[in-house]
Structure formats: C-alpha cells, structure tokens
Image (cartoon, helix red, strand yellow):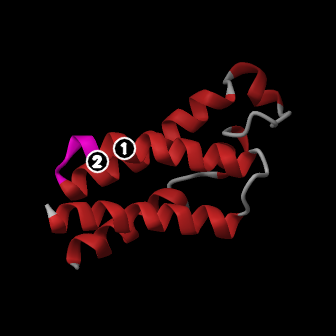
Amino acid sequence: MLTLFYLLMGHFIADFPLQGEAMAVEKSRHSTTALQKFVPWYYWMTAHCAVHAAAVTLITGNMWIGLSEFFLHFAIDVAKCEGKTNIHQDQMLHILCKITWWLFLTVL
C-alpha cells in the first residue's frame, strides 16, 4: 500500500505544484500565446509527461512502467486539451493508471 500512496502523492506533486501555469497553458495545441510561437505545445506536453514518467520510474523502480506512464499520461492530457474529457475525468484516469501500476507490481 505504501507504493500506491507514493504513486498517488507523486502524481499530485507532478500534476499541480511541478506543473507551472505556463506548462498548463502551453501544453495545449490550442494555445495562442506568444510563447507558443517559440516553443511548440508538444515540447511542453513531452516535458510534463516526462516528469510524471520519472516519478513513476523512481517510485516503482521499473522503467517499463515509467514509459507506460509517459505515453498514457500524454494521451490522457491531450484528450483533456482537446475537450474530450474534463478535469475530473482526467484526474480519475490518472489515478486509475497509478492503481494499475500498483496492481501490476503487487500481483506479479
């Protein structure tokens, strides 16, 4: 259970205090700020997802789970930025990923 706790806390730290306002805005391809002209959205999204992947890798000690986190986090956040999900669905999907990683480690 401690690993699940760490995964959840790592998520909340990476998704809120470590994701500054600029990253939260610029990771969307719909951003029209001046900064978007110099640093494209996918750089921001990649950096944001890499922070999450690093946290998951450090907590689980498993690079493959970290890579899975990277790609799933990317897909989930793109869906939110495209208006296909809302903040509540976004957070639920992220938490379900953490539970899945924990179950994978626990069962195997």
Q: Mark 1–mark 2 contact, CB under 8 Å?
A: yes
Secondary structure under the numbered disc 2 in the rendered image: helix
Specify the farthest residue to the bottom. 1
Residue 29 horizontal side relative to residue 57, left or right: right
Residue corresponding to mark 1: 68
Assess disc 2: are there few (<14), some (14-19) or many (≥20) residues with their C-alpha within 10 Å of its C-alpha.
Answer: many
Element type where label 1 sits in the image: helix
State the residue lying farthest toward the left: 108
For the point 48% across and 46% down, the residue is 72
Say which amino acid is labelled 2: Ile
Residue 48 image position (x, y, % from top left):
52, 43
- Quickly name the residue at label 2: 65
Q: Is residue 61 left or right of residue 22?
A: left
Taking the image as shown, residue 25 lies to the left or right of residue 8, namely right
Q: Please state which of residues 35 and 91 is positioned toward the viewer in this rendering.
A: 91
Image height of 54 relative to 45, above or below: below
Nearer to us in this view, 46 or 96? 96
Left or right for 43, reference 108: right
Residue extent of the magenta highlight: 61-65
Query: As displayed, is residue 10 above or below residue 75?
Result: below
Q: Quadrant of residue 23?
A: top right
